[in-house]
Image: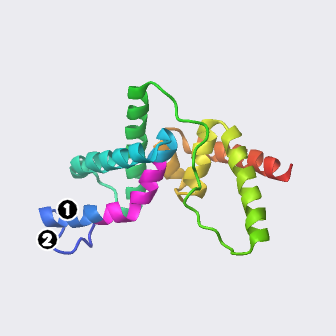
Amino acid sequence: MSEDVGAGGRGSPAGDEAAFTLLVRRHGRVVFGVVFRRVGDRATAEDLTQETFLRAWRARGGYRGGDAEARGWLCAIAANVARDHVRALKRRPTEEEAVFDDIPSVTDDPASTAEAAASFEQLRAALTRLPANHREMFLLRERDGLSYKEISAVMRCPIGSVMSGLARARERLLQAMEA
């Protein structure tokens, strides 16, 4: 999975485990975010994140990309796991998603904190009004830092659709924040 796997070396069971552990540490939060935004429940997202890594472990022999492509590969698996789960429940994720709950406050000043909270709520409200696919693209890019290529793989759409979807999402969010 990686050239710098440490004990055991590439291709050995110990090397595979070391490389995979590194993947989990590096990309676990992003994978969790992809799943959580689709299912809307923290406990379910934790279970599905584990399922994502189990599927990735089982498919590791067929993975031919480098570490740079691993995040996109894992996010695509996560999106599939979440889709399978949602289909099985025959329900849609809630519109009120806790997309930025884990971002800490940047100031202790009450006035600044209140102003930031108001802006945050305005952004949250604007995000919920975006079409679901544009919201997902925006969060994958801005919150999780995925590349256009990675978003394309996760969303199963052409890169051009990602680019135009992100442009529309940013435009709508900017309009909402200026209003």
Q: What residue do we see at 16% from left, 74% from top?
A: 7
Say the numbered circle drawn on residue 118. none
Residue 27 magenta:
yes
Range of residues picked out in magenta: 22-34
Residue linked to disc 2:
8
Q: Secondary structure at mark 2?
A: loop
Q: What residue do we see at 43% from left, 34% from top?
A: 83
Q: Residue 35 in the image: x percent, y percent? A: 44, 45
The front one of 172 and 47 is 47
The chief SS type of the magenta part is helix
The amino acid type, in three-letter code, at marker 1 is Asp
Q: Residue 177 in the image: x percent, y percent? A: 80, 52
Residue linked to disc 1:
16
The amino acid type, in three-letter code, at marker 2 is Gly
Is 31 displayed left or right of 126 in the figure? left
Picture quarter containing residue 127? top right
The front one of 137 and 24 is 24
Image quarter hosting the N terminus: bottom left
Q: Secondary structure at mark 1?
A: helix
